[in-house]
Structures are given as structure tokens and as C-alpha cells.
Amino acid sequence: MPKQTAIKYLSNPAAKALGVYTFTNFFGKGVAFLLLPYFTNVLSKEDMGNITLFSGATLFLIPFISMGVLQSTSVEYFKLEKKDFSNFFTSSLLLPVGVFILSLIVFYFGREILIEKYKFPASFIWVIPVVTFLSFISQHAVNMIRNEENKKLFLLVVLGRLFLEIGLAVVLISALKMAWQGRITGIAISFAAMGVYAFYFFVKRNYLFGQINKQYIKDELLFSIPVVIMQFSTFCMNYSDSFFLSRFTNDNNAEVGVYGIACIFASIIVTLCSALLQYILPKTYQLLSAPVINYNSIRKHFLAYIGIMTAGLLVLLVFVPLAYKFIINKNYLPGINYYYLLCIGYYFWTIAYLFFSFLLYYKQKRKIIWLSLAFACISLTSNYFFIKNMQSTGAAISVFCSYFIILIITLFFTRKQMHFLFQKN
């Protein structure tokens, strides 16, 4: 009987879709993780520190450039008629373009602070805004392909960009000896190529060049405020620790490099989260938009997500230390001391974000704003105190403690939206 049940489940179209989206995202990230031994052996700790800061800076900027468009578009796709959606899609893109131009100006005038205080290379001043905007456009295209439930194209686009990025990085680092510059150049070129394809995709699907609607822009601007605050809060929780560590150490970001590798391993659990949510959130939004809401189906998706995430955590806690022992350059071995706390802390966040997604769907702006601000304050205060006094060890303790507090707060404030999880029907 269990075997028949498993076969029946795996033959279900929804299970197949979940499998494709999960495999594509997780395998794509997995390739990058498998290349960590290569990067840690050909790049210095200072190189890895620069790459960690670059990644953190782009993730800091992405919520301001995206302006909530990624979230609102996934919601409106299932609500609006085709023509109205084209008008919405075109109108909503004006906000990210405007913020991108503004970010170039802000980074230019703030370049001295970034270079002196956080040891940014000069090229970061213009590369970070450009790559962040291209990353937003790429993710926008991937989300639309996912919303169309075009699994083959999703697989091709996501993995194609990743292999281009990794292939270029290996060539530029090994053949041209470009060190950290080669890694970032590979990222930039791959996102530029994806940006060109995204433009073609948007035009071909008639998403782009609809009529500009001022009301859509106004509504999007209002919707973006809580989303931007929430995403900024996410940056504070996930990446501000690296910037604090850079600020309170004086070793050309070598300590940031060691800590960054520990964060990369710990973030495998976040990668699994993102892969699952690529399917679960659009499906949940679709179910919530139906005339009769099937809460039983939503509950099954939620419980499956929590179960898979918990199993993933246990696997990572067992096997990643083996990677540290046998694969990674020994210069990065001290990072294992931070890994366990980081991984469990990130797990707390993946569960909290699932519940938080309901507030996004129902656009409970006031609650999102106040919770996001509270999360940012908890994270920044914790990071400042622990990192200033304990550096990398303090950063790991801070991540664990702050995420646990955030999970408890999230569960409390979403208890009304989550009532169906505890009902039989």
C-alpha cells in the first residue's frame, strides 16, 4: 500500500511540477556549491571576502530596485485579464528603472565611504547597481515562465544562465588569472545575456509595451513600500553580518572570506527553501484566488514544505562537516565553528518566511511594515553587539538568536491567517 501511494503521488502533475522546479533550482545552486573546492583553492581568503561583499551589496540593493514588482506581478498574473496584465506589467517596470538610475547616482556620490570604510574595490561602485538591475530582470523573466507553468523552458533558462556564469568564471580565473574579478565578470556577463533574453521573452509574450496606467503605478508604489521594507529587513537579517564583520576587522576581508564560506554552506537550506517556494507560493496564490478556496490543499502544501525543510536541515548538519574535512581548502576550516549555528538559524527563517507570505498575498501593509522594521532592528542590534565583541563567532550566535526570535514573532502575528492548518476541513 505505501508503495502504491508513493507511485500515485509521483505520477500526480502537481508532484511532477514541484519536482521540476525544486530540482532545477536546487541543482543549479548545487553546481555552484560543488565548485567551492575549486574556488577555495584558486582564490585567496581576501578574494572570497570581496566576492562575499559583492553578493551582499547586490542583495541589499535588489529590494529597492525591484520595488515589490516581483511579488505583485506573481499575484496579479492570476487575477487580471491578458490585456490588463500587459498594461500592469509595463507600468510596473517604470519604478525599477527609475530606482536603478537613482542607485547609480547614490553609489557614485557615496563611493568614498564604501571604499574607505568597507574596503570596496572601485569597480564595485558601478558594477553592483548594473548587475543588481540585470538580476532583477532575469528573476522577473524566470517568475513569469514559472507562472506559465512552462517547466522545460524554466529548466533551460535557469540552468543555462548558471552554466554560462560558472563556465566564464573558471576560464577567467584559471586562464586569465583574474582572481575575484573573474568570478564577478562571469556573473555580470551571464546576467547581461539573460537580460537580453528576458526582453525578447517579454515582447514575444506581449507582456511589454502595454499602455502605461498611472493608477497601476500609484498602486504599485503603495504596495512596494511594505515589500521594500520587508526585503530590506531580509538583507539586515541575512547579509548585514558580513558588513559588520568587514567593519570590525582589519585583514582586507580575509575573515569575511572564511565566514562567507560558512554562510554559503549554511545557505543551502535557503536554496532548498527558494526551490520549493518557486512552486508552492504561486500554487498557494492560485488556490487563494479561486472562487472557492481549497484550504485542505493549501495545508498539504504547507506541511509538505515544513517536512522537506526539516529533513533537509538534518542532512546538511550531517554531511557538510564532511565537505569541510575532505574537500574545502584547510584555510577555511575555522568556518565549521560557525556553520552549525548559521544553518539552524537560516532554517528558522525559511519556516518564518512561509507564514509571512500570507501577509503579502492579503497585502496587510501595516503589519508587514511594523514586523519588517522590528526584524531589521533585532538583527542589526544583535549583529552590532555580538560581532563587535566576538567577531565571527558572535556573528553566528547573532544569526541563530535573531532568527529564532523572528520565527516566534512571525508565528504569533500570522496565527489568524494560519488557522486552516489546524482544522480538519
Image: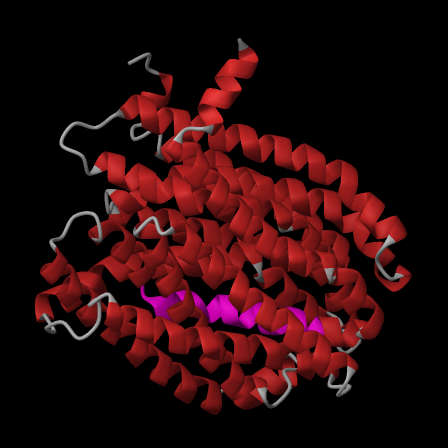
Percent coordinates x, y for residue 65 in the rendering: 37, 71
Quarter residue 72 falls in: bottom left
Residue drawn at x 12%, y 74% is 212
Residue drawn at x 56%, y 45% is 272
Percent coordinates x, y for residue 326 in the rendering: 89, 51
Residue 231 visible at all: yes
Q: Is residue 125 above or below residue 71?
A: below
Q: Nearer the viewer, residue 193 or 291?
A: 193
In the picture, measured across the screen, residue 355 lies left or right of residue 351, that is: left
In the picture, measured across the screen, residue 346 lies left or right of residue 282, that is: right
Dividing the image into 4 quarters, which one contains the C terminus? top left
Q: Nearer the viewer, residue 219 or 87?
A: 87
Predominant SS along the magenta part: helix
Residue drawn at x 14%, y 71% is 210
Q: How many marks?
A: 0
Percent coordinates x, y for residue 170 in the rendering: 72, 75
> Which range of residues does the magenta coloring cover?
49-67
Residue 247 visible at all: no
In the picture, measured across the screen, residue 399 lies left or right of residue 6, that is: right
416 part of magenta stretch:
no
